[in-house]
């Protein structure tokens, strides 16, 4: 880790934004964070980790210990004691999940699952697909970041966005913004076997929405594979 990276994770500098190259821009914490935040006392490390893990449980629904800690990038050693304490306090409830070998947990205030409608193209770093093994276990959807994979070795493409439709991951698209042509180009679209018949229509709607907030006036498709029947 670089020197500036160490200072960032130690809270000695804060990030204000990122450049187009995805590099962070840093400044002093007192010029970035609200005064009320800076004035708060520094919590005990175990207390802080316990709070982070509680928030992880609230966000993830039914996670394993590995998924709980990964949400805020805690190490196994740092997460072990706080998880035990949260279980003892009744904040985390150990639960069995059919087909899972790992122990799962449920936040004490979790509500029963509900059906989810709607459509969305997910960022490469969306929490839903950030933990790849969890995504694969929950959705049967294998997703890997291939930006740093050599072009001829990529399975799906360079900048592939998963498509979430009515609570299921049903497709993925490799996109490119062609500024000269004023178009969002779909280099490749791949559909899952269980994708519903209206997947293409609803995907195009989301692509047009994305093109609009990117300042592009058109959507072009180069290749679509595994189109849903119907």
Image (spheres, helix red, strand yellow):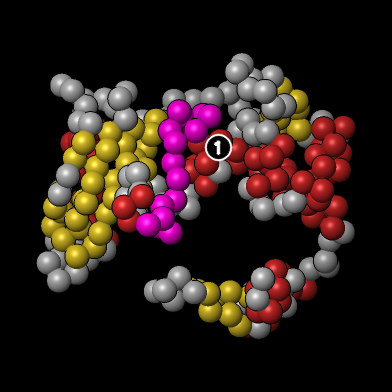
Q: Which residue is mark 1?
A: 133
Quarter of the image where one finds residue 172: top left
Quarter of the image where one finds residue 55: top right
**Magenta region, residue range:** 136-150
* Residue in the picture at 16% in, 61% down: 183
* Residue in the picture at 12% in, 67% down: 181
State whether residue 215 appears in this view: yes
Quarter of the image where one finds residue 120: top left
Report if residue 142 lies within the magenta region.
yes
Q: Position of residue 76 (x, y in %)?
A: 77, 46
Residue placed most toward the observer, 28 or 224: 224
Left or right side of 227 for 93: right
Asked which secondary structure carries label 1, the reply is: helix
State whether residue 35 appears in this view: no
Picture layout, residue 35 above or below residue 68: below
Mark 1 Cα shell of 10 Å, populated few (<14), some (14-19), many (≥20): some
Q: Quadrant of the C terminus?
A: top left
Report if residue 204 lies within the magenta region.
no
């Amino acid at each position: 880790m670089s020197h500036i990276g160490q200072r960032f994770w130690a809270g000695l500098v804060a990030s204000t934004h990122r450049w187009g190259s995805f590099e962070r821009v840093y400044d002093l914490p007192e010029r970035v964070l609200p005064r009320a935040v800076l004035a708060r006392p520094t919590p005990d490390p175990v207390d802080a980790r316990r709070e982070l893990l509680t928030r992880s449980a609230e966000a993830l629904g039914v996670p394993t210990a590995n998924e709980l800690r990964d949400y805020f990038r805690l190490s196994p050693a740092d997460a072990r004691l706080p998880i035990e304490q949260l279980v003892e306090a009744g904040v985390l409830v150990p639960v069995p999940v059919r087909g899972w070998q790992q122990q799962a947990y449920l936040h004490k205030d979790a509500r029963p699952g509900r059906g989810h409608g709607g459509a969305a193209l997910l960022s490469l770093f969306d929490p839903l697909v950030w933990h790849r093994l969890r995504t694969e276990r929950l959705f049967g959807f294998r997703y890997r970041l291939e930006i740093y994979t050599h072009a001829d070795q990529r399975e799906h493409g360079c900048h592939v966005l998963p498509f979430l439709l009515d609570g299921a991951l049903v497709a993925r698209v490799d996109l490119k913004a062609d500024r000269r042509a004023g178009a969002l180009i779909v280099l490749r679209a791949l559909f899952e076997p269980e994708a519903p018949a209206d997947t293409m229509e609803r995907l195009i709607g989301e692509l047009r929405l994305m093109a609009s907030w990117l300042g592009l006036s058109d959507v072009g498709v180069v290749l679509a594979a595994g189109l849903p029947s119907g």
